[in-house]
Every structure is written in structure tokens, then in C-alpha cells.
Image (cartoon, rainbow, N blue to C red):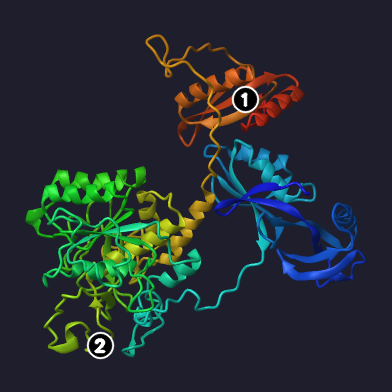
Amino acid sequence: MSKKITIQTGKKKLKLKKSKDLVGLRLKKKGGKAEKKAQVEQKVLDHLGGFELVTLKKKGKALDKALDELRAEKDVAVGTHVYVAEGSTRPMVPTGVLYITFEEGVSIEEQEVVLDEYKLELKERRSDTDVVARVTARSRNPVKVAASMQALSLVSRVEPDLDTLVDEYDEDLLMPPDTLFPDQWYFLNQGKVPSAGYTVKRGADARVVKAWERLGSRGSSKITIAVVDNGFDPNHPDLSTKIVKPYDLWTGSSRLSQGDPRFTHGTSCASIAIAPSNGRGIVGVAPNARLMPVSGTSFSVEATEKIFDYCVRNGADIISCSWGTTDPAYDLSPVKEAAIARAARQGRNGKGCVILFAVGNDDLDYISYYAAHPDVIAVAASTSQDTIASYSNRGPEVWVCAPSNGDWPLIAARASWDQGTSLRGPGEFRYWIDGKNRGNGYKHFGGTSGACPLVAGVVALMLSANPELTAREVKEILKLTADKIGPAWEYDARGHSRKYGYGRVNAERAVGEALRRKATQPAPQPTPTPTPTPRPSAATSANLFRLDVNKQQARGWGVQMGVFKEFAHVLRQAEIWRKQFKQPLIVYITSLNGQAAFKLVLGQFEDINEARALLNKVKAAGQQGFLRKLSDFVSV
């Protein structure tokens, strides 16, 4: 049985083994036919990763020899093994390209040493740490190169580019069957509202359907959105199956207040974010997410603390608030500000709850005091014509805008006791601006109240893609991926507008960036077996060290074990490695990005073979390192 090779790809590690009968061939002559080669039994695929996939007449162990013979032929540019992942039958072909992320602080010179060591050609430098490289004629197989590079302490992540067959989906696979979905222009704006024949601006939407396609699903059921509001109808079919850990501030219990016609807002807001795809009515932005209804908005300091502490304590990932105040007499107190900050920084086990507030509907040049909090994502409203909604408040704290009414409205669930509005007259005018009944239990909706939970749903899709994102990273990604709409002169040099914030939210790009950051996060490392150490006492302490400092000549070889920014980490790690490998530790002090950095080298040998023997011991112990010539540290 062929040996398995473990590599990092996408979000997980793959165990690969060579195919027993397939190989990939790329001929030098364009249009050449690999199947005409004498050794080829039959062609399987015309094109995969730039190769023709064929079976050879020799199988098993003899396949290696047959492939080598083909590689030696003049008209063969490249011959490669084909791989199969554990648990799959799909062929995977390495294209020869590797995506490499070095550790922070690794210099360009050190990166070049690594590339030279593996005989790789630099194809593209994308940042100080991210490079794209390509194998050369002198390189090993890219899969083996990636597996070997993963063990280097200087390399955070390396992923070989692999091509394989993908499933072809019908265009409508991710289109929900819900009856009102065609009218939800804010998910996919195709230029018209079907039920009304009303013309809207094509593309003026939040790219929600495209985000589902990018994610490959409609989000995770592990994400919980807390909607803080009044008037939740727990029996509505768009809420009833989604509720977890409800809390009512007014009853002090899980029993939600119902029936008061003055309070119906929460049902509509929640549905925009989480309404399930159940074949009826609307669908939410994140229809698989759970709902934590927190009923009972209040200006009270004590109530504010209760609300946000409850959300943190009970596992809310996102907190959506479509309420606030712009009355100058009711600015936020320091205690309220602290309660919001605490949730934004301590929730989600330290990653922070993502908190969103609507900016308000007063057509003012400043926004709700709650939305202006620096840890909050302040959401303004845009229209189906991609303009700012005239009622949406403006200010320097506006972060993003999202589709709502102002031209054609959103659709939302309505509570069973919702009496609608009498502004338009009797009948269905109470619920639908054109008087056309689109089904009981739903209504037209809007305001920044509708825009805010729409963005909360987008955040739920982002956290479905990458649950490790911090609240600050989510806020940053929304900024970086938003679409600039409206006149260019509305935006300042930072790309910010007092009306639109950083632009209209783009769920597709936000999810894509969340996935990209997930892919570039270092893979979890196994926890090494701790070296037994004495318990701290009055005589010994884990933070007390004895130093013996000697000047080190820059000659010979050692094994570089890492780069550290904190000297305390150097001391602790040096103690562990010195005891484990019985070798001296050499520290090279340098500066990276204006800050001190410490490169730690284990051992010092005149003979490179002795250093190589130590490196083998280091790797056998499950540690990472690479050979380092000490003269490289001499300042020029």
C-alpha cells in the first residue's frame, strides 16, 4: 500500500495517496495527444490542472518506472502522479503552484533561503508574509514539497494547488422555495419586483444569494443572533422553530410579552435575519441561524447591563438592535458604554459579540447615541435604487448601509396581533404599500430597523464561514468588502461617507474574505508533552530565571527554532529546549517593523553535519526548526 502524505488544503488537512493507475501528462506541443503514447492505455480526462489524465499499461509499483520513462521523452513537458484523498475516489492533480504563508517577522532574505532550499521559483509576492511559488525542474513533487515545508518553524502555512472534479449545481439549487422570495429584491435584485411589476435598480442588493453560493450553504445552525426588541410572536412559523434561550426584561423570565398592538417590531426585525426556508412566506439572510429573542428595550442603565450581560452569558454570537435615541438629553452614560464594550470584547469566549445598531430614521446629521459607540457596527439604510434612504441619519460613525425602504420596501413577518397602519386606509393597505395581499402573517417593512438585522444576518454567514473571527475582524471585513454606491464625492480620502459609511454591505465579498482568512489561519498544532517542572514556591518561580550571558562568535551552524517578539517567551522556551536537547541557546536580537525581535538558535557546530544531526533530533521530538548559518546574523 502506498504511503499517505498529509497536507493542508482549504479548511482541513488531507491525507493523500498516489493513484495506482492514473498519471497526468502535459505535452510540449500544443494540441498533442497523450493517448497516442505507446505506454498509455486510455485517456480518462482531457484537462485537469493543465494535464491530460491517462491510465498506463503498467500498474502498481511499476507505475513509477513507467512515468519516469515518459518524463524522459522529448515531447513530454511534465509528468505527474495523480493523488486520491482518503475517503474519496476523485483524482487530484498538483498544478505545481504552492501558496506559502511565512510566520510574522520572517525576513524576505530568510524566505528566499527557504525557497532556494526547495528549488522553488517565486511567482508572486502578495504581502510581507504571503508568496506564491512554483516548482522547477529541480524541485521535488509539489505535494511532497508542501508536506516537508509544513514542518518548518518559519512557515505558518503551505498549500499546494490541487485540481479535482467539482460538482455542477443547477443554477436554482440555492434558491429558496419560499413563496415571497421572488419579491425579496434585497437578496438578488434583477430589476423588477415580480408581484408588483415595479422597476428597481438591477444589482442594488446585498448579494445574499451569491454569498450562499460562495459558502455552499445558507449558513450554520451553530450561530445565534440575539435580537433585542419588543413584540416577538413566538408562534409565527418564521420564528417558532428558531428560538433559543428567550428572555423578557419586563417579566424577568423566558415568557415573552405578547398581544400589545403597540409592540410588534421584534417579529419583523428577527424574521429579516433568521426566517427559515420552509416553503412559505419569506426567507432570512441566515435561515439556518438560531434566534435569541431578548424582549424589553429600555433606556435604564440597569436594564442595559442586564440585556448585554444576558446575551454574553447565554452564548449570543451577534446582537442586533433596531432601536436607540437621538435626543440630546439622553446621551449614553459611562456605565452603559461599558456594558456594550464588555459584550463586544468578552463575548464568544473572548472573541467578542458582534453588536449592530440602526443609526435611526430622523434625517439628522448625527446618529443614535447607541449606534455611535466605537465597538458597534452602525447601520444606515439604502434603497432599491442604490441611493441613501432620505430618512437615514448621517454621521462619521456610520459604518455600512444596507437595503431597506425609501423606494420599494422589504418584506417581513408580522405578529398575529399587528394591526398595521391606518395611514393608507383600510384593508390590506395596513400591511402592503400597494394594497395587494401577499399572504397573512407578512407585511412591507423598512427603515434602518430593517437594514440592521439584514447586516446581522450577513455577519451570521461570515461566522458560519469562519467562526474564529473576532468582533473587530468582522467589523473590519464589512468595511473592506462593502460596495461604494452613490456619488464618488460623497466619500472622503479614507473611503468613508457620512451617509453610506464605507458603502453598501456585500455579503458575497464578506463571506469570501471570511473564508480566505480561515484558509490562511495557522493549522492547530498538537500540544507538546510538557516537561515536568517544580511547582513555584517561595524559592522557585516559573517567572524567575538565571542568565549566563556570553558573547557568541558568528561562525558555524545551528538550528533556528523560532522568532519571538516577547523576551519572556524566549526565556521560557529556551529553558524547555535547553533541558530537552542538552544544547546551548543563542539569541540574535534584531528589529522587525520598528520593534525588537528575538531569533532563537539551538546549538553551535563547526560541522554542518553535526547541526543536521541535531535538526533530525528536533524533528523526531515533534519540534520544528531549520539549519542556520550563524554568519548570516552579522550586520552589514
- Out of 36 and 249, give the one closest to the viewer: 249
CA neighbours of label 2 inside 10 A, class few (<14), some (14 to 19), many (20+): some
Q: CA distance from mark 2 to mark 1?
A: 80 Å
Q: Quadrant location of residue 282?
A: bottom left
For badge 2, the amino acid type reads Asn
Q: Which mark is residue 513?
A: none
Secondary structure beneath label 2: loop
Identify the residue position indicated by label 1 in the image: 634
Where's residue 336, x and y in %? 17, 47
Identify the residue position indicated by label 2 in the image: 437
- Out of 210 and 13, give the one closest to the viewer: 13
Q: Is residue 488 left or right of residue 449?
A: right
Given this view, does label 2 or label 1 mark the residue nearer the observer? 2
Q: Residue furthest top?
A: 539
**Residue 95 showing in the rendered view:** no
Where's residue 395, x and y in %? 22, 60
